[in-house]
Amino acid sequence: MSKILEIVELYAPLQNPILVTGETGTGKEQIVKIIHANSKRIGKLVSANLSAIPKELLENELFGHIKGAFTGADSTTQGLIEKAEHGSLFLDEIGEIPLEYQVKLLRVIQENQYEKLGSNKTLPCTARFIFATSKNLEEEVKNKNFRSDLYYRISTFHIHLPPLRERKEDIPLLIDYFLWMIQHKFQKVLKFEADALKALLEYNWPGNVRELENLILKLALSLPEDKTIVLVEDLPKKILQKDDLDLKIQELEHKKKEVIQLEKDIIKEVINFYKGNLYKASKKLKMSRGAIQYKIKKYSLK
């Protein structure tokens, strides 16, 4: 995470769009707040979750409208782009935006201008765009659910947040931070006994940092007022069930994704090394030429 924060510090002052990816609960919104706080932009941070905006209202939400643009448009309104003037516009779950609106968003990013609904007057866009998603946008592009030109436009400056199960050394630090928050918010002092802390370190945390934060908050509110030490028996059963089938299946799926990504990276590196010579690449990879051609097509390597 310290390396990620170094990247955040590097990207924050830029005017370019930033894409933040990671599973639900990994802290994408917190990273966005840090980016904006270090951007030195004079405007505010405006946030919107695109998955929560009905499709038919999305264009109006983004661009706003002028009076008389449609039935019921009794006054001119500000869209998200205008509200984020000279600031940052954070669009969460960018992978959910319908295809027909992706090209309009791309134009705004490329040309830094837009029009309100019902108007032919072009307005300047001074907002800096920050996007986030829990989806694999490369797969969405491959499946034709997301425009490739928009993806490449927004992913040049990319920050990926790993799930908590891949950075378990952060768990004790996060626990200390959340316990400090509990102490200041509820004037309650809590500590975890060694076995309870061990159980937390062994758990896979499918809900990531958010799940850990919610657990500590729940313990603080549910334990007796005079109890300051969290014992292993105070923890939810799901955390103690080490052989839980659902967790095993989830871990298997995660490992599959890791292997696929590793294979994709290695094949791409070998092909580039041999300057596209599939005969030499097949020898190095101990794979038939046909198998490499299949992988190239499967992973969209060309």
Image (spheres, rainbow, N blue to C red):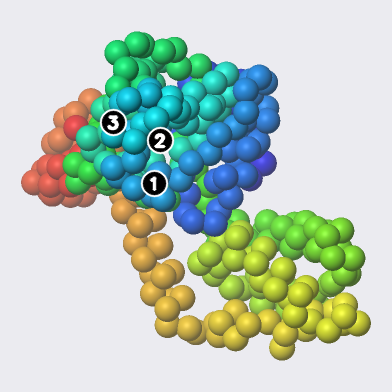
Q: Quadrant of residue 111?
A: top left
- Give the total of numbered labels: 3
Residues marked 3 and 1 touching at CB (< 8 Å): no
- Mark toward the start of the polypeptide (1 vs 2): 1
Q: How far apart are the alpha carbons under marks 1 and 2?
A: 8 Å
Amino acid carrying label 2: it is Glu
x then y, percent, for residue 153: 35, 25
Q: Secondary structure at mark 2?
A: helix
Q: Secondary structure at mark 1?
A: loop
Residue 61 numbered mark, or none: 2
With respect to residue 189, does 59 lie above or below? Answer: above
Amino acid carrying label 1: it is Ile
Residues marked 2 and 3 touching at CB (< 8 Å): no
With respect to residue 152, does 211 lie above or below? Answer: below
User: Quick one: 124 or 184, which is closer to the camera?
Assistant: 124
Q: Please identify the residue farthest to the left as the structure is shown.
A: 290
Q: Which residue is mark 3?
A: 70
Q: Which residue is mark 1?
A: 53
x then y, percent, for residue 291: 13, 49
